[in-house]
Image (spheres, helix red, strand yellow):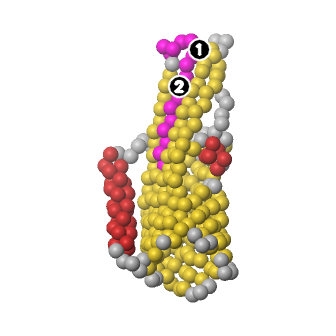
Amino acid sequence: MSSRSGCRCSTSGTGRHFPTSAPPASIAVRSCRWWIGIGLLAAAFAAAAADDDWGYTATVYLWGAGIEGDTAADNHVDVGFDTLISNLDMAFMGSLEARRSRWSLFADVVYMDVSASDSGSVKLPVGPGIPARVDADVATKGTVLTLWAGYDLMSSETARVDLRAGVRYFNLALDFAAQLQPGPLEALAIERSIHDSLSVWDGILGLGGEVRLGERWYGLYHVDVGSGESRLTWQAQLGVGRAFDWGDVALSYRHLEWDFKSGSAIDNVHFSGPLLSARWHF
């Protein structure tokens, strides 16, 4: 079978299986948490909008991140950014910050919808070998939502250090369908499908800010760590930016990782890669 997915997997053959989907009650609780988080942030931004002293920064970016991780079945998965782009259906990456005096509110969203189809032929181990056609479709949707409130611990003409506390949400959904048809024998066609998903909320605590490097140049940094429904999540970002009359452009490197608790379909996953961003202040 030919493949255009470009991912590399290694299997140790433990025979473990992914758990079944979460019960409806669990899904409802997680959905409720999602909307509570969105509602609290929306209320905070609405309150900020009523005060003329608030300033806002909107950012859009392209994060050239690959995905790497290990499943509960001891499979290692490594998917490069070029593979994600070639199979991308839809994506959004952006953030919004509101700042007043020493306080700030921040929201960051990463959403990706990736799908791929493949087909090929194999010989079934029956008699001399019966030719069979295999068709497979896979679709993956991932969402990362980060919300935090920040407090300016130190600010001068050359540097700023913020203490940041909030929550991070991660959701990954997988749909897989395959059909095996032995030659012209349509009545013997076999179809299989799999749907699995993983959702976690974690509290996070971190530090971040900027350092002035010149009249228009600056360095940016952020690091956070947290836990909750996952065993551990952490993030680090470091880069350099340049200010223009209309806004800023920055180039940085970002790493985001989770280690999940036992019983999850995935043991760990991380996203790493360069990030190019543009932001506007208003």
Residue furthest to the front in view is: 245
**Residue 49 is a magenta residue:** no
Judged by its main secondary structure, the magenta piece is strand
Q: Residue at x 64, y 80 (%)?
A: 212
Question: Where 12 sits versus 109, above or below?
Answer: above
Question: Where 240 sits versus 132, above or below?
Answer: below
The residue where tag 2 is placed is 179
- Check disc 1 and give the amino acid type: Gly
In the drawing, does residue 143 fall left or right of residue 84?
A: left
Q: Position of residue 266 (x, y in %)?
A: 52, 49
**Residue 177 is a magenta residue:** yes
Q: Residue at x 53, y 68 (%)?
A: 280
Dot 1, how many residues are within 10 Å of its Cα: few (below 14), some (14-19), or many (20+)? some
Q: Position of residue 25 (x, y in %)?
A: 31, 49
Q: Residue at x 36, y 54 (%)?
A: 30
In the drawing, does residue 127 fall left or right of residue 195?
A: right
In the drawing, does residue 151 fall left or right of residue 182?
A: left
Q: Position of residue 154 (x, y in %)?
A: 53, 86
In the rendered image, is residue 262 in sight?
no
The residue where tag 1 is placed is 183
Badges 2 and 1: C-beta atoms under 8 Å apart? no
- Residue 7 location, quadrant: top right
In the rendered image, is residue 176 in sight?
yes
Question: Where 80 sits versus 206, above or below?
Answer: above
Dot 2 falls on a residue whose secondary structure is: strand
Image: magenta residue range: 172-188
